């Protein structure tokens, strides 16, 4: 293998390692900074007063913009739909709504 190919290969491997380290840092920072989708779901469930048998489906999505982050939590039951917006850092309920299914 000539010297140029070895140099390109070493540079490529160094860039891959650097990219993995940066990606790992951002994943760690996300997990350390936010409450997590499961905790957001538990906060919403506690606010509704429902138990597990009453829940047909639950879905949460992490959303963010430049200044804040939140979880959109949707809970479907047999007869009602609940929608929550939970602050991703504090767990505070920012808004909630319910409607008959």
Image (cartoon, grey):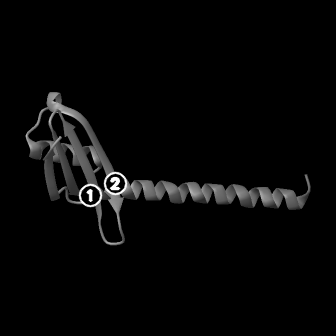
Q: Is residue 25 left or right of residue 40?
A: right
Of all residues, the one furthest to the right in this rendering is: 2
| 3D distance between C-alphas at marks 2 and 1 | 8 Å
Q: Is residue 21 left or right of residue 66?
A: right
Q: Quadrant of the C terminus?
A: top left
Q: Quadrant of residue 16?
A: bottom right
Measured as percent of width and height from the top left, residue 12 is found at: 72, 58
Say the numbered circle drawn on residue 88: 1
Q: Is residue 51 left or right of residue 72?
A: left
Of all residues, the one furthest to the front in this rendering is: 101
Q: Residue at x 35, y 68 (%)?
A: 65
Q: Quadrant of residue 2?
A: bottom right
Q: Is residue 8 left or right of residue 81?
A: right
Say the numbered circle drawn on residue 54: none
Nearest the camera: 23 or 2?
Answer: 23
Measured as percent of width and height from the top left, residue 40 is found at: 23, 49
Measured as percent of width and height from the top left, residue 19 is found at: 59, 58
Q: Is residue 93 visible?
A: no
Nearest the camera: 45 or 97?
Answer: 97
Q: Which residue is mark 2?
A: 62
Q: Is residue 22 visible?
A: yes
* Of the image marks 2 and 1, the number of the one nearer the N terminus: 2
- Badge nearest the viewer, 2 or 1: 2
Q: Residue at x 14, y 49 (%)?
A: 98
Check the image and report above or below for 54 versus 28.
Answer: above
Measured as percent of width and height from the top left, residue 9 is found at: 78, 56
CB contact under 8 Å: marks 2 and 1: yes
């Amino acid at each position: 293998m000539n010297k140029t190919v070895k140099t390109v290969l070493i540079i490529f491997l160094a860039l891959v390692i650097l990219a993995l380290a940066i990606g790992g840092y951002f994943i760690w920072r996300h997990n350390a900074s936010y409450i997590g989708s499961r905790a957001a779901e538990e906060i919403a469930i506690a606010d509704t007063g429902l138990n597990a048998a009453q829940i047909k489906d639950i879905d949460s999505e992490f959303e963010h913009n430049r200044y804040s982050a939140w979880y959109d939590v949707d809970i479907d039951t047999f007869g009602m739909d609940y929608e929550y917006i939970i602050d991703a850092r504090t767990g505070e309920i920012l808004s909630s709504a319910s409607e008959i299914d």
